[in-house]
Amino acid sequence: MQNILNSHLRVASLLTLLFICLFPLAGRAQDLFVSDRANNRVLRIGGKDGAVKENFARGGPLTSVNGIVFGADGNLYVASEDGARVLRYNGKTGAFLGTFVPQGSGGLKGAVDLRFGPDGALYVTDFPGNQILRYNGKTGAFLDVFVPGGRGGLNGPIRMTFGPDGTLYVGSFFNNAVLRFDGKSGGSLGFFVGPGVGGLRKPTGMRFGPDGNFYLGSRENHEVLRFSSSGSFMDVFVPSGSGRLRSTEDITFGSDGNLYVTGQETPAVLRFNGKTGAFMDNSVPFGSGSVRGITFGPAPAPLAVQPAAAASP
């Protein structure tokens, strides 16, 4: 009888382990982090209920917050636009860890967006300086001007993303286009989205979606546009006014496959169906109309699996 019981326990343990391996995030959605420029704060929002958990980032010269990104070290990096610096916060507690990129380092005039590249370096769009700067991803030391103003038609770099092939895609704000640059050399690869294609007016947040297509915020017409992986215009994925979206700012996809969008004049984080673009809900209403960067936190750690009881000899 004891042997039969032990056998059942082992089977149950194996089934539990299999379930966790196949569904590692089941019921444990990632938390969402949002930079609220109007109140100089970064909010942490619960991935399950959409409720604001806390003012996450604490301390340091946290002013004019914009782009935010998690590094490979698990910490949160925050662009201080008018402060022309990048700050670092403990990714678990929100404690201030220090200024990662000092004010004005490498000629930085205004840090807007942040991305860690395939090489591990930190890339920063300097909107007022009309350039993309590169910094050591571990120390924050200035490395080089990765893309100078004017290269490939760059005029007002705002938000950016790295593609699956390591190519850097950058929104060129003042000529209503998206440019491509070699992810290793910074050399121009030409237009990905030509000026005004698809009705683009002031490009903002951009991401490659789970379907491999390219999604792009269009600020002045309050839309999210969709392009193929080759840059061909497909459709207006989120039409103007859907969910009361105003002044599209940043976008990202969640682990649920849906699209999350912020807007400079939108007092909430909006969620849209990741396949159809249909408005779903105000995922995070919090009353501020100057929301900028958005990112999901690191994936939750796997659940611990209790070993099955040892069989009797």
Image: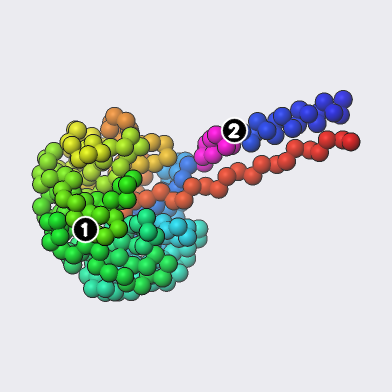
Describe residue 194's horizontal placement relative to residue 162 as left or right.
Answer: left
Q: Secondary structure at mark 2?
A: helix
Residue under the point 47% across and 65% down: 95
Residue numbers of the magenta segment? 19-28
Residue 167 appears in the figure = yes
Q: Is residue 24 magenta?
A: yes
Residue beneath label 1, please? 187
As drawn, 176 above or below 27: below
Q: Which mark is residue 19?
A: 2
- Which quarter of the image is occupied by the C terminus? top right
Residue drawn at (33%, 67%) of the image? 135
Which residue: 52% across, 47% down? 300
Q: Is residue 279 found inside the magenta-colored segment of the image?
A: no
Q: Amino acid at mark 2?
A: Phe
Label annotation for residue 115: none
Point out the image quarter for the N terminus: top right
Secondary structure mostly taken by the magenta-highlighted segment of the chain = loop
Q: Residue furthest right?
A: 313
Residue 131 image offset from top left, x and y in percent: 20, 64
Quadrant of the rendered structure where residue 154 is?
A: bottom left
Label 1: which secondary element: loop
Nearer to the camera, 88 or 228: 228
Crowding near pointer 1: few (<14 within 10 Å), some, many (20+)? some
Between the C-alphas of marks 2 and 1, the distance is: 46 Å
Left or right of residue 119: residue 310: right
Based on the displayed image, in which of its 4 quarters is residue 140 positioned? bottom left
